[in-house]
Image (spheres, helix red, strand yellow):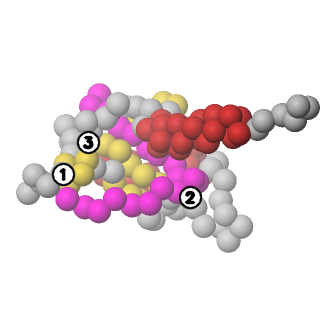
Amino acid sequence: MAEINVTPLVDVMLVLLIIFMVTAPLLSAGVPVDLPDSRAKALGQDARAVTISMPADGKVFLDQSEVAPGELADRLAGLPRESAGKPPLVTLRADKGLEYGRVMAVMGELNRAGFNAISLVTNGSVKAP
């Protein structure tokens, strides 16, 4: 018999594909943030989404790299745009212990940089008021 049986290869590849599909969404949260609870519905995932994280210490992270206090607008202006000039989707993950003014200052920087549609990330919960 001079044929190669590819069935085990296909089985292994399908299992690996399923493993990567399950673990890939879990890798998007790189900065640990204690998110507030909400009863809002989950939004779909966008491959071009930019994540801004604010942990309890008040630092600002663009995706997984820390941003110095004055350079957030410059870093946002350097992000690639669509062909129509539309900016990518921005998701803001802010710790629930942060003061409101600090979060609003970052949202103001986002607005000034041309990002008018910002998604706020929360924990899904039915216990929220």
Which image quarter holds the N terminus?
Answer: top right
Say whether disc 2 or disc 1 marks the residue closer to the N-terminus: 2
Numbered badge on residue 125: 1
Per the image, label 3 sits on a secondary structure element best described as loop
SS class, disc 2 = loop
Q: Say which residue label 3 marks.
A: 35
* Residue 46: in magenta span: yes
Quadrant of the image occupied by residue 10 = top right
Q: Secondary structure at mark 1?
A: loop
Residue topped by disc 2: 88
The residue segment tinted magenta is 39-57
113 left or right of 84 in image: left
Amino acid type, residue under disc 3 in the picture: Leu
Write down the quadrant of residue 108 in the picture: bottom left
Residue 18 picture location, percent across and down:
54, 42
Residue 127 vs 10, above or below: the answer is below
Q: Is residue 116 above or below residue 28?
A: below
**Magenta stretch: residue 99 in it?**
no
Q: Amino acid at mark 1?
A: Ser
Asked whether the residues under the numbered discs 1 and 3 touch, taking CB atoms below 8 Å apart as contact, a structural biologist would say no
